[in-house]
Image: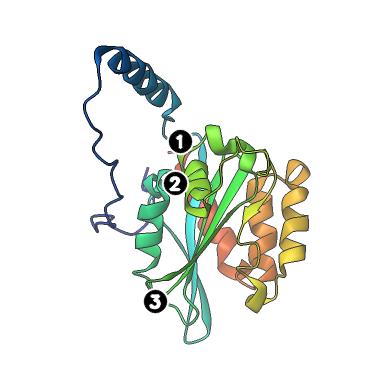
Amino acid sequence: MVRGRFDPDDQADERAGLEDVDDVDDGDEVLDEDEDDLDDDDELDDATDDDIDFVVALYREDGAATVIPLEADLANDLEDLIAQLQRLPGDAGAVGLVSLNHEVLVAVRVRGPRHVQVMTSDLYFVDVFPIVRDVADFLGLDPGDDDCPEDGPAGDLNLFADQGLSEMDLEAMCMEEDDLGSDELAERMVRAIRFDAGFGKVIDEYWDGDDD
């Protein structure tokens, strides 16, 4: 199955690594091994082709709305998705939409190299899909904290405010996601920002490819 029209050979920025730690005594080494085991257990498996509903990009060039499919692998790494979106043309930047298992949507908007906005429709999936965890990390959210919601929409819900979809309306859409499904949520979003003309055709190509 062919996913998208872009060759994702481009490199994204390297993520910062962990700082070196000082040597510790034998007792502390045992504790460190236990912590490593917890980190290994906490690592999430990538979303599979069956999990990925679609990964698409939206942008306007000379005022014309364009919707294109992106490589499915971008559904597993927010940094790579951002890097790919930054390479696209666009009068007002480019938007990426990732729908997973008809349950959770991730939206990213980039305008230039520094202005990046991200959101997810449901933070509940932070321990299910790597890209949702990436969104939480990007936003500096820790779902284990008392002041952080365990589920529901999170992030820059005003990312489409200048395109006719207010923060309040987007939040309301996300709260209806249990009834809509994340793919239907995406359809409502693109309709609100007037990208719906090409969206359906691109999504049909994704789903038709699943039958090959």
Circle 2 residue: 75
| Foreground residue among 147 and 156 | 147
Q: Is residue 137 visible?
A: yes
Q: CA distance from mark 2 to mark 1?
A: 7 Å
Name the amino acid, label 1.
Answer: Ala
Earlier sequence position, callout 2 versus callout 1: 1
Badge 1 element: loop
Name the amino acid, label 3.
Answer: Pro
Q: Evaluate if marks 2 and 1 touch, with contact meaning CB atoms under 8 Å apart.
A: yes
Badge 2 element: helix
* Residue drawn where x is 29% and y is 41% of the image: 18
* Residue drawn where x is 72% and y is 52% of the image: 174
Image-based side of 191 in relation to 134, left or right = right
Circle 1 residue: 47
Image-based side of 176 in relation to 31, left or right = right
Circle 3 residue: 89
Residue 79 at what x, y percent from top left? 38, 54
Q: Evaluate if marks 3 and 1 touch, with contact meaning CB atoms under 8 Å apart.
A: no
Name the amino acid, label 2.
Answer: Ala
Image-based side of 208 in relation to 81, left or right = right
Q: CA distance from mark 3 to mark 1?
A: 28 Å
Q: Quadrant of residue 39 in the image?
A: top left
* Residue drawn where x is 49% and y is 73% of the image: 59
Earlier sequence position, callout 3 versus callout 1: 1
Against 141, residue 189 (above or below) is below
Against 70, residue 125 (above or below) is above
